[in-house]
């Protein structure tokens, strides 16, 4: 690896610079981030303690051991992630004497083939799913726990249990999921800058409710389970859990 730099944990000023450096890198972190990309100039400014600090903070997000690997394609940058991500898809990790580890991604062989060109097909509109709010993330994470603890429970009953649990959670827990929701939204906006949430028209909502209610009645008639009335409040949307993103 490159020689140690000047940003580390030794001294208050150095620690402040390290905190600023991490704040810039932390913008990449989201529930979908598996590998952190660090500019080469930034990496070279970090001493060993600074690199350990950055790796430790990133491990809190990915929940597994990570290591630094230089970009083997010639770009001046360093990757930080779990070893398994660098060998997936045919990637290769090499060690160069005096330089450390390099990550080389396999490029597909270049072949020339004759291709019959078909008439252009109009691009199909791709519906981008609305990013989940804090409660949806909370419910998704705990759904299997409630189901495992209550064999035979229905999804509707699970939603009722989790809806009550969410309304009784502390502000600290609720803030955790609100922050996760914002991170997911930011990742979506980076991938789809033109995304805008377009709610269904009233007529579409009424038609969807009728269809859902009819399906529930058919399921209830088949298994003998009680079915909520159309006017009953939905446990999927606790009154104070609307965190529209």
Image: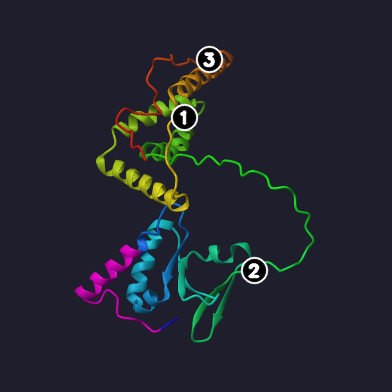
- State which tag comes first along the sequence, 1 or 3: 1
Extreme residue toward the front, this view: 119
Q: Which residue is mark 3?
A: 217
- State which quarter of the image contains the N terminus: bottom left
Residue 136 vertical placement versus 105 (above, below): above
Residue 90 within the segment the image draws in magenta: no
Which residues, given as a range, are shown in magenta?
3-24
Q: Residues within 10 Å of mark 1 (few under 14, many from 20)?
A: few
Mark 2 and 3 residues: CB-CB less than 8 Å, in contact? no
Q: CA distance from mark 1 to mark 2?
A: 49 Å
Mark 1 and 3 residues: CB-CB less than 8 Å, in contact? no
Residue 23 within the segment the image draws in magenta: yes
Q: Of tags 2 and 3, which is closer to the observer?
A: 2
* Left or right placement of residue 23 versus residue 198 in this view: left
- The front one of 201 and 243 is 201
Residue 18 vertical placement versus 141 (above, below): below
Secondary-structure class at tag 1: loop
User: Residue 233: which quarter of the image?
Assistant: top left
Q: Of tags 1 and 3, which is closer to the observer?
A: 3
Secondary-structure class at tag 3: helix
Residue 61 vertical placement versus 78 (above, below): above
Q: Which residue is mark 1?
A: 150
Q: Residue at x 41, y 54 (%)?
A: 30
Q: Could you say where residue 240 lies in the image, as x and y percent from the top left? A: 29, 31
Q: Could you say where residue 26 lies in the image, as x and y percent from the top left? A: 35, 61
Q: Which residue is mark 2?
A: 107
Q: Could you say where residue 3 lies in the image, as x and y percent from the top left? A: 39, 84
């Amino acid at each position: 690896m490159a020689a140690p730099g000047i940003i580390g944990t030794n001294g208050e000023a150095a620690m402040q610079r390290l905190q600023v450096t991490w704040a810039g890198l932390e913008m990449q972190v989201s529930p979908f981030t598996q590998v952190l990309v660090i500019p080469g100039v930034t990496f070279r400014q970090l001493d060993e303690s600074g690199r350990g600090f950055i790796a430790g903070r990133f491990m809190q997000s990915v929940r597994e051991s990570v290591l630094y690997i230089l970009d083997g394609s010639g770009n001046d940058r360093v990757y930080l992630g779990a070893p398994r991500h660098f060998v997936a898809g045919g990637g290769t990790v090499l060690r160069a004497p005096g330089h450390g580890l390099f990550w080389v991604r396999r490029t597909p062989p270049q072949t020339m083939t004759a291709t019959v060109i078909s008439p252009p097909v109009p691009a199909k509109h791709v519906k981008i799913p609305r990013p989940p709010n804090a409660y949806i993330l909370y419910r998704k994470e705990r759904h299997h726990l409630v189901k495992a603890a209550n064999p035979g429970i229905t999804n509707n009953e699970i939603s009722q249990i989790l809806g009550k649990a969410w309304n009784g959670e502390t502000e600290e827990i609720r803030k955790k999921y609100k922050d996760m929701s914002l991170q997911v939204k930011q990742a979506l906006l980076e991938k789809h800058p033109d995304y805008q949430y377009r709610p269904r028209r009233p007529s579409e909502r009424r038609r969807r409710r009728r269809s859902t209610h009819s399906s529930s009645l058919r399921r209830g008639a088949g298994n003998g389970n009680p079915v909520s009335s159309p006017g009953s409040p939905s446990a999927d949307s606790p009154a104070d859990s609307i965190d529209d993103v």
